[in-house]
Amino acid sequence: MKKLQRRKEKGPAVALNPEGVFENTGKFSAIKISQGELPATIFNISSLVSIDLVYNEISGIIPENICSQSAKLERLGLYRNRIYGEIPSGLTRCRMLQTLSLSFNQLMGSIPTEIENLSSLHYAALSRNNFSGIIPLSIGNMSEFDDIGLE
């Protein structure tokens, strides 16, 4: 089941074409999808502010080009899914990101040290994954950062 939400402004939202590819057709602020593969094309929606895919059966990787088109992204919620691979360094292009929720997935590798470049980030939930390495000390220097979940 795919559920699309759009802003209250008039005009078209995002369309899912027959191939399952999202097309940016107008003002759009949030997206919710339940089950299936994480469609990399949702990260091409320039007006997207929130991706909320928590408690689903979504699988796949977070694409390297995240936020190259959706620079307005403030919330990335992929909590309790089957997301695997590493946190891409491209995540640091999400300059407006305030909330990062990646707990309870199958992510691995290290937490990118470039995460310190996310100057708007307030909260990061990264627990219950398979991360290795050390937590970047630079996280403590982030001015807006309030909390990180790493248990």
Image (spheres, helix red, strand yellow):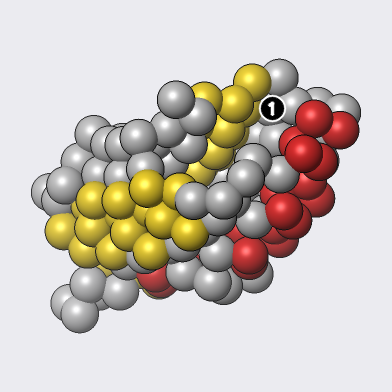
User: Tag 1's secondary structure?
Assistant: loop
Residue situated furthest front in the rendering: 133
Vertical relation: 86 (above or below) 100: below
Q: Position of residue 97 (x, y in %)?
A: 66, 42
Residue 47 visible within the image: no
Which one is in front, 83 or 14?
A: 83
> Which residue is under mark 1?
122
Q: Residue at x 32, y 59 (%)?
A: 84
The percent coordinates of residue 103 (x first, y second) are: 39, 36
In the image, what residue type sits under mark 1?
Answer: His
The residue drawn where x is 62% and y is 45% is 134
The part of the image, by quadrant, that contains residue 90 is: bottom right
Is residue 96 or residue 144 the one in the foreground?
144
Outermost residue on the bottom side: it is 19
- Image coordinates of residue 130 in percent, x first then y, are 37, 48
Left or right: where 12 falls relative to 135: left
Residue 5: name its quadrant. top left
Whether residue 70 is situated above or below residue 136 in the rendered picture: below
